[in-house]
Image (cartoon, rainbow, N blue to C red):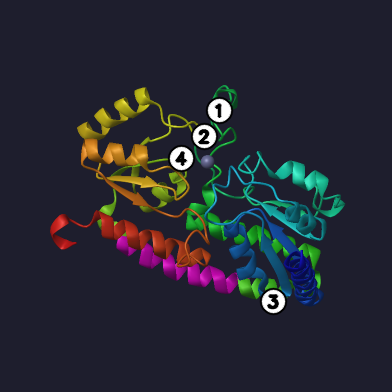
Amino acid sequence: MRSRARLAHTIRALAAALALAAGATRADAAVRVVTSTEDLAAIVAEVGGDRVSVESLARGYQDPHLVEPKPSFILKLHGADLLVVVGRELEAGWLPRLVQQSRNARIQPGASGYLDASQNARILDIPTGEITRAMGDVHPLGNPHYWLDPDNGRRMAQAIRDRLTALSPGEGDTFARRYADFDRRLAEAEKRWDTRMAPHRGTQIVTYHRSWSNFAERFGLDVVGFVEPKPGIPPSPAHTLALTQDMKRRAVPLIVVEPYFDLRTPNALARATGARVLVLTPSVGGVKEAGTYIALFDYNIGLLVEALQPAGAR
Ligand SMILES: [Zn+2]
């Protein structure tokens, strides 16, 4: 009993300290921002600097389609001036209900404190004809993993700059200057990434989920198949068999897997076809090396280039 009382006391003290710390950041911040993912938080931090506070609800190592809602999310949403979402139904399974429950009119869809970052982005895989969500496809409005094209990162940063400026006009010059600096560093990094990826243009790969369409388009990879039969549908024996035959025929060298998927089917595919399994991280914060938006690409491109080197050069 005594240790339980001590624990309760410690938790209360910790909660008070956390509240103080949060208050200290927020008092200085012009805009309190909450984002659904760490990728968005990283871009908000680039543009907003110390003029904003920013917190992500999901962690970078989580499947952004399937985030377990926590009571703390509602508290964070309740105090936010701006909510930035990936949109395209990426968060449809967990976020809309929390936004309703936050009882914060500022961040409801349509309000000035709600920003869907997909609005100016280049969106791929937009379904034609009937929408297939009824069959389990979790990408009914096009591919929501669009942040994996750095030019979309730039467009997202522009939208964030404009919204932060609308919410805090006095800081507009700061946001404009910080955006220009991010844009310059991103353009430099893109040259570096293009150079490294140039020898591998046209390489055929298979990915687990349809997370890499924008990345592949930007860097010239050819995604020829998916371990999932449809986005959000787990591997099936019939699909895996057909994929094995297709991968053998094409001599696909690489299976890219997101960190939150089971490796059994990718490993079985690798054994059957001679391909290699490579775990890449689609989000900032998925691994500690991918701590910023630019570092996320440096990390993944580094692993890709290493994996695609001819066997003798490894
Ligand atoms: Zn997806």
Which label sits in the foreground, 2 or 3? 2
Q: Are marks 3 and 1 in contact (CB under 8 Å)?
A: no
Q: Going from the N terminus, do you reach mark 2 or mark 1 first? A: 1
Q: Which element is circle 3 on? A: helix
Query: In the picture, which quadrant includes the N terminus?
Result: bottom right
The residues bearing labels 1 and 4 have C-alpha atoms spaced at a distance of 14 Å
Q: Is mark 3 within 8 Å of ligand 1?
A: no
Mark nearer the N terminus (3 vs 1): 3
Q: Which residue is mark 4?
A: 210
Amino acid type indicated by mark 1: Gly
Q: Quick one: label 1 or label 4, which is nearer the N terminus?
A: 1
What span is in magenta? 179-196
Q: Which residue is mark 1?
A: 136
Neighbour tally class for label 1: few under 14, some 14-19, many 20 plus, Cα within 10 Å: few
- Measure the alpha-carbon separation of dots 3 and 1: 41 Å
**Circles 1 and 4: CB atoms closer than 8 Å:** no
For mark 2, give the secondary structure. loop
Disc sitting over residue 232 in the figure: 2
Within 8 Å: ligand 1 and the Cβ of disc 4?
yes
